[in-house]
Each structure stands twice: as C-alpha cells, then as structure tokens.
Image (cartoon, rainbow, N blue to C red):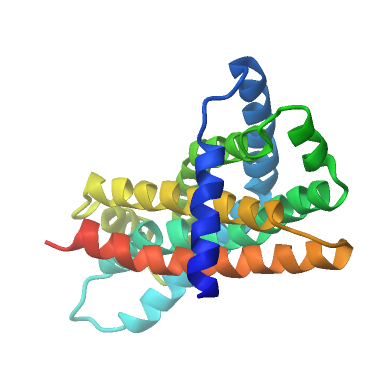
Amino acid sequence: MKVFSQLGEYLLFLRQVFTRPDKFRIFHQQAVKEVESIGLESLWIVSIISIFMGAVATIQMAFNIDTPLIPKYTIGFATRQTIILEFSPTMISLILAGKVGSKIASEIGTMRVTEQIDAMEIMGVNPANYLILPKIAAAVFINPVLIIISIVLALMGGWIVGTATSLVTSTDYILGLRSWYQSYDVFYALIKTVVFAFLITSISGFYGYITRGGAEDVGKASTKAVVQSSIFIILFNLILTQLLLND
C-alpha cells in the first residue's frame, strides 16, 4: 500500500510542478542557471568516462572478434552500436542520477527542513513549480547535448586506443563507424535521454520536497532519490527499447 500511496503523492507533486509559471522571465532565468548547474558542471565527468569507456569497448570488441573470418571494420561498427544504443544514453544517465539527482534532492530537502519552502507557500508561491520545473526543463534540454558529446568522445577514445595498440587500423575503424549507419539509432538514444532526464529531476525533486526532519533525513532523501532514479532508468530503458526497437 505504501508504494501506491507514494505513487499518488508523486503524481500530485507533478500536478503542482506542471502549472503555468507566474512570471516567465523568472522561470527563464532559473532554467538558464540550472542548465549550467545540471549540464555544464557535469561535462567533465561525462567526457572522462566516455573517452575511457569508448576505449574499453573497442578493446573488448577486438578481443571477441579475433578471427580472420570477420573483417576488422566490424570492430568499429560494433563499438558504434554499443556506444549509441546503450552506453551513452543509459550508463551516462545512471551516472547523472548519482551526481545530479543527489544534488537536487539534498538542495530541495535542505530548503524543506529549514522551512524555506513553507515560507514560500505562506507568501502564495507555488514552490514545486518555482523550484522543480526549471530543473526539469534544463535537464530535458541539456542532457541530450551531453549524450551527443559523450557519443563523439567515446568513439574518438575507441579510435585512439584501437590505432595506438594496432588492434585496428584507422581506415578499418572509420569504415566500421560509417557502415550500416542509421540516423534512427541516434534518435532512439536521444528519446531515451529525454525520458531519463525527466525521471532523474522529477524523482529527485520529489524526494527532496517531501523530506521531513533534519540533516539525517536530507541524507536519506538523497540516497532514496539516487536509488529510485536508477531503478526507473533501468525499467524505462527496457520499456523504451521494446517500444522503439521492436520491429
């Protein structure tokens, strides 16, 4: 019963969030700040992880395709598919759930336990809309950009390691990247990213918003936000894959 009760609370929370902002100028300013906080501050970790994981994916593909019967350019093709379809949209979103989700939950939770949100309610401000909607809008906008950057850097990392270790020539790797390319694969990755961005920000904001107690409870809310966001990312990854890639 607690699950359904919390689901109902979450849906009511979203109803509060998705109302018309009182002042679009303020909403725009908040959204721009959140783009920097959520997106630009996460760029460094996304870049580092993408480069190394692209390199690892290339090495693994080369190890598993170590036979003269399979052309070397298959390494580039397999790496590209792995990066675009699964690693960048899903794994990077899980990493952002930890970094961004915990930050949002702790920020909103701290405002709740210090009664700042209560003060906003007394002044007639809709705190859910004012605090959470700009974060959702910013994440939905900037996360796909991070994923595109992640894909490019991962493929570059694979190319650097593949050529440096002589596992695959530059010509074969690039030929594999270009072989059987379908733009729908990138579209599929971006659709997943948008859904995951919404889940991360809305779930994290929800757990921060319903926090009661003190500093310890803020920490618990932050942990719950990361765990629940990660679970729902995995769940919706399965659902979206079935819907978008099922012929």
* Residue 62 left/right relative to 16: left
Vertical position of residue 130 compared to residue 220: above or below: above
Residue 87 % position (x, y): 44, 63
* Residue 47 left/right relative to 172: right
Q: Quadrant of residue 79?
A: bottom left
Vertical position of residue 98 compared to residue 41: above or below: below
Q: Residue at x 30, y 51 (%)?
A: 188
Q: Residue at x 27, y 54 (%)?
A: 175
Q: Quadrant of residue 85?
A: bottom left
**Residue 169 visible to an observer of this rendering:** yes
Q: Nearer the viewer, residue 179 or 22?
A: 22
**Residue 162 visible to an observer of this rendering:** no
Residue 16 % position (x, y): 56, 39
Residue 68 % position (x, y): 22, 81
Q: Nearer the viewer, residue 74 or 106?
A: 106
* Residue 152 left/right relative to 132: left
Residue 235 % position (x, y): 40, 68
* Residue 242 left/right relative to 10: left
Question: In which quadrant will I find the C terminus?
Answer: bottom left
Q: Quadrant of residue 45?
A: bottom right
